[in-house]
């Protein structure tokens, strides 16, 4: 496990927790340290409890862990909420002069670092900067050069003027000096800096950036946690490349706008979360039957119904796989890391256009709220490839006209993929419909044509199986007897968990599966293993179910559905327990 | 666009299955005439059709077209136009499609004011499902699902449009071929959302709102001193419950379409073979 430090700032919603946490995370990233952030938050604008957590190391970090070293607590509740993660060497920074914080008790032998945040902030120019005073104090405790904060403060407050930036720098230094002068302690934490060059972004931003890189020019959406960041990222930015974001009146409209834009020839997308996916389901079938390329992103959160809107879950797998009446050909792609959110988005657009089929891009809250460091080359734009499939223009449209000169937009080609003429193409005019239709797109109930068109649409999936590489990502010991399988965002926690298990003598082969449909055939891998464990953030084991169905063998399951993502240390323990439990007697 | 386009170029070779005498024949002919008259051709025209008898229009006309999900035709049209403002976009559907299941989209499409036309074939009945009350059915109109009438007032779509900030509101009647085509043409030429409610009688299931009824009741605004640019006059006429008008009720001549306000002028269909030039700047933003 990397030599890491776990830091958090917590308080009430509206206290500026997020932006303060982000300033610190950015400072660490700029100082050449790896960062992995997470959030505890509730669906409310003010009050309650919210926290921004940062795990940082010189080595890569891929997960959160159950340990908190430095905690800035703006409320007493923040300490209670994190009691289980605090330990005897933890340092808790709080303002003991605040009336609500005077009787605070820190757990165990943890260090209580009382810093008059508000008073020092006022000295620097305003009480509003008390969070930044706390950041300065944290710098001192962690031996982190305070200059690293300056650029982040400039980025955050630059548009408010030079004076505000300077005041904030001063506030940070007051916090630092106070700790240096008042506490004669060596805190044993040392955030060393490196020359490495990192960028810091979350999964939603990676999806938005991937979309723009892939040529997506039209986005329609309706705000919903935790997918809103995709929309906010693209708003304004996609305009610079000739595109537009439209905020629709609801998700029914959003997916239909995106569908319309795709019919007009634009690479188009919508992103939502579970409740929005429910509404969009109405239109899935139309997208598939009209053979319209469309990327539909589901950033999953805890369901059903309104569920726990700000909590993690991988509960929509069946929905994206089976949602909608009738039989709907589709692709379901689930990126496994924040950087893969970028690359899988690019791939999703290519799949959509090559096969003229809806593509579900399934991410989740854990990735959406995780800001993680990467070297900029991770997102090498020269590596982005665009494949628009069988688009015909005015020169080759003739090839696809029938004997009466009509364009055959649903021509039953051998590979299932028909020619595509964008509106405006001379002689390409054609209709399409959600009704079963013939090769011209006209409604039909002819039994032979029905079979021809159903087969043609399904054939696209078979063609994709042959032409694409729907493979898993493999980690750990390829020869191990124990096989762990997971999908989506659990990859990071499992990879770190594996190193812990390895230290304890457990050898494990880990397959992280980003393709849900079509998906890799895992029969050989499963048959070669003695123990097979499927890990996912839901109660019923939706992925385990389909794997059992594919392979006709039972698997062990590790499920988590309390709304919190898997953590590396916790997963390692769970896997150990699963492997160590006595085999059930044969019946 | 070629200058010799005739309205029959917009006709497909599929014969309509509408009942003989259905108002939708006249409505569609007027749409085709208006499209040809405004210099459009099938290759630059995109028709979006709703669900219901009216929704079949995409099949009977020849152009780029999508016949989609019940009630969602307007969002599709908005997406098409935003992605390629050079296309002529016309959305068509019925009173059920537009004012019941799609009512939410209707008011938002009105206020969004994308440059397109919306032609609603209003027959005050659900025809394709064989005669149930529609949102524009009269309060006492007896049907299989409303034996004592719907017992609720009909939706006034023109009032909804006016309240939602419409820039063009018109009413036409399918059997007056010339005026209907003229009115749809004005909706196409309008810089913004051109909304035309068309009385398009159902001869099979509606024996109240018939051709005879509309012929007697309808007043052509061109034969009055109505000032279409006067919102108050429009409001008064729209809220009169005992009169049926034909013509342009309201037009904001200063209307600027949404896509223009948003700076969208070019088709979004053309993209580079790889990531756009300068895309690494997007990555650098995250330093």
Image (cartoon, coloured by chain):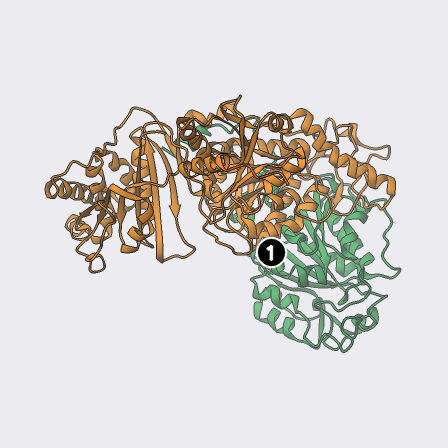
Chain colours: A orange, B green
Q: Which of the pair A468/B22 is nearer the observer?
A: A468
Q: Is residue A286 left or right of residue A251?
A: right
In this orientation, does residue A418 appear?
no
Residue A181 sits in quarter: top left
Residue at the top extreme of this rendering: A479
The answer to whether residue A418 is above or below residue B69 is above
- How many C-alpha atoms fall within 10 Å of the one at disc 1: few (<14), some, or many (≥20)? many
The image quarter containing residue A147 is top left
- Quadrant containing the C terminus of chain B is top left
Q: Position of residue B220 (x, y in %)?
A: 73, 68
Q: Is residue B221 above or below residue A153?
A: below
Looking at the picture, how far across and down is residue A318, in whole percent?
62, 44
Kind of element beneath mark 1: helix
Choose between A434 and A95: the one closer to the eye.
A95
Total numbered circles: 1
The residue closer to the viewer here, A566 or A373, is: A566
**What residue lies at 75% left-to-right and 78% top-to-bottom?**
B140
Name the foreground residue: A207 vs B219.
A207
Q: Is residue B193 visible?
A: yes
Above or below for B248 versus A567 = below
At a point 39% along the width and 27% down the height, the residue shown is A503
Give the letter of the chain under mark 1.
B
- Locate residue B123 relative to residue A168 in the image: left or right: right
Q: Position of residue B227 (x, y in %)?
A: 62, 67
For the N terminus of chain B, give its image quadrant.
top right
Q: Is residue B199 left or right of residue B203?
A: left
Label 1 belongs to which residue?
B109
Location of residue A459 in the rendering, given as x and y in whole percent from the top left corner: 74, 32
């Amino acid at each position: 496990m990397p030599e890491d430090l776990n830091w958090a700032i917590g308080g009430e919603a509206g206290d500026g927790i997020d932006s303060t946490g982000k300033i610190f995370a950015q400072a660490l990233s700029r100082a050449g340290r790896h960062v992995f952030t997470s959030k505890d938050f509730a669906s409310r604008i003010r009050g309650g409890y919210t926290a921004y957590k940062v795990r940082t190391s010189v080595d890569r970090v891929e997960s959160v862990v159950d340990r908190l070293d430095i905690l800035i607590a703006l409320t007493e509740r923040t300490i209670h909420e994190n009691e289980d993660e605090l330990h005897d060497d933890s340092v808790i920074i709080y303002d003991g002069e605040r009336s609500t914080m005077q009787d605070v008790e820190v757990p165990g032998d943890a260090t209580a670092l009382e810093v008059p945040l508000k008073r020092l902030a006022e000295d620097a120019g305003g009480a509003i900067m008390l969070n930044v005073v706390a950041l300065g104090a944290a710098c001192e405790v962690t031996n982190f050069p305070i200059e690293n904060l300056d650029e982040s403060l400039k980025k955050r407050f630059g548009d408010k003027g030079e004076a505000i930036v300077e005041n904030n720098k001063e506030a940070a230094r007051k916090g630092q000096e106070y700790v240096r002068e008042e506490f004669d302690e060596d805190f044993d934490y040392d955030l060393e800096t490196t020359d490495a060059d990192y960028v810091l972004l979350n999964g939603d931003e990676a999806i938005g950036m991937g979309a723009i890189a892939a040529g997506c020019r039209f986005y329609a959406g309706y705000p919903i946690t935790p997918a809103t960041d995709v929309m906010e990222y693209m708003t304004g930015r996609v305009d610079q490349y000739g595109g537009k974001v439209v905020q629709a009146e609801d998700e029914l409209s959003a997916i239909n706008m995106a569908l319309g834009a795709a019919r007009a020839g634009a690479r188009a997308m919508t992103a939502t979360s579970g409740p929005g996916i429910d509404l969009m389901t109405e239109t899935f079938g139309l997208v598939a039957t009209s053979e319209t390329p469309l990327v539909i992103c589901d950033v999953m959160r805890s369901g059903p119904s309104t569920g726990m809107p700000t909590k993690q879950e991988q509960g929509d797998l069946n929905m994206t796989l089976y949602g909608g009446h009738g039989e709907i050909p589709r692709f379901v792609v689930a990126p496994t890391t924040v950087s893969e959110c970028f690359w899988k988005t690019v791939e999703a657009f290519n799949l959509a256009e090559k096969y003229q089929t809806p593509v579900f891009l399934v991410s989740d809250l854990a990735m959406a709220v995780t800001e993680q460091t990467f070297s900029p080359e991770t997102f090498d734009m020269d590596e982005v490839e665009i494949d628009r499939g069988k688009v015909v223009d005015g020169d080759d449209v003739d090839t696809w006209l029938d004997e009466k000169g009509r364009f055959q937009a649903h021509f039953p080609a051998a590979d299932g993929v028909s020619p595509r003429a964008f509106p405006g193409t001379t002689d390409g005019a054609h209709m399409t419909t959600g009704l079963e239709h013939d090769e011209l797109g006209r409604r039909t109930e002819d039994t032979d044509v029905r079979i021809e068109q159903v087969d043609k649409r399904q054939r696209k999936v078979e063609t994709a199986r042959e032409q694409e590489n729907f493979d898993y990502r493999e980690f750990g010991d390829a020869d191990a007897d124990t096989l762990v399988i997971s999908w989506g965002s659990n990859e990071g926690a499992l990879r770190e968990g594996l190193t812990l298990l390895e230290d304890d003598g457990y050898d494990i082969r880990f397959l992280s599966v980003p393709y849900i449909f079509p998906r890799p055939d895992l029969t050989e891998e499963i048959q070669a293993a003695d123990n097979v464990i499927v890990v996912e953030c839901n109660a019923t084991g939706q992925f385990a179910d389909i794997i059992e169905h594919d392979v006709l063998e039972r698997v062990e399951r590790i499920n988590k559905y309390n709304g919190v993502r898997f953590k590396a240390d916790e997963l390692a323990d769970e896997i150990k327990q699963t492997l160590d439990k006595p085999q059930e007697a044969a019946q | 666009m070629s200058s010799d386009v005739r309205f029959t170029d917009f006709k497909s070779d599929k014969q309509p299955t509408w009942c003989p005498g259905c108002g939708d024949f006249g409505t569609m002919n007027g749409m085709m005439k208006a499209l040809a008259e405004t210099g459009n051709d099938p290759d630059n025209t995109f028709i979006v059709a709703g669900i219901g008898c009216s929704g079949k229009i995409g099949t009977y006309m020849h152009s780029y077209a999508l016949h989609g999900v019940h009630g969602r035709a307007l969002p599709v049209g908005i997406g098409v136009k935003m992605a390629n403002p050079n296309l002529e976009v016309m959305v068509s559907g019925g009173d059920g499609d537009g004012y019941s299941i799609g009512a939410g989209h209707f008011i938002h499409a009105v206020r969004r004011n994308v440059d397109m036309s919306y032609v609603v074939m209003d027959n005050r009945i659900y025809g394709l499902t064989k005669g149930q009350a529609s949102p524009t059915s009269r309060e006492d109109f007896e049907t299989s699902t409303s034996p004592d009438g719907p017992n609720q007032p009909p939706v006034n779509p023109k009032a909804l449009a006016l309240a939602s900030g419409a820039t063009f509101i018109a009413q036409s009647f399918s059997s007056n071929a010339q005026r209907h085509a003229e009115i749809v043409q004005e909706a196409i030429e309008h810089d913004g959302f051109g909304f035309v409610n068309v009385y398009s009688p159902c001869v099979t299931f509606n024996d109240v709102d018939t051709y005879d009824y509309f012929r007697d009741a309808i007043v052509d605004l061109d034969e009055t001193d109505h000032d279409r640019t006067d919102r108050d006059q429009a409001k008064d006429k729209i809220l009169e419950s005992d009169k049926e008008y034909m013509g342009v009720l309201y037009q904001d001549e200063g209307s600027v379409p949404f896509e223009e306000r948003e700076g969208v002028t070019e088709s979004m269909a053309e993209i580079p073979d790889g990531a756009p030039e300068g895309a690494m700047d997007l990555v650098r933003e995250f330093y």
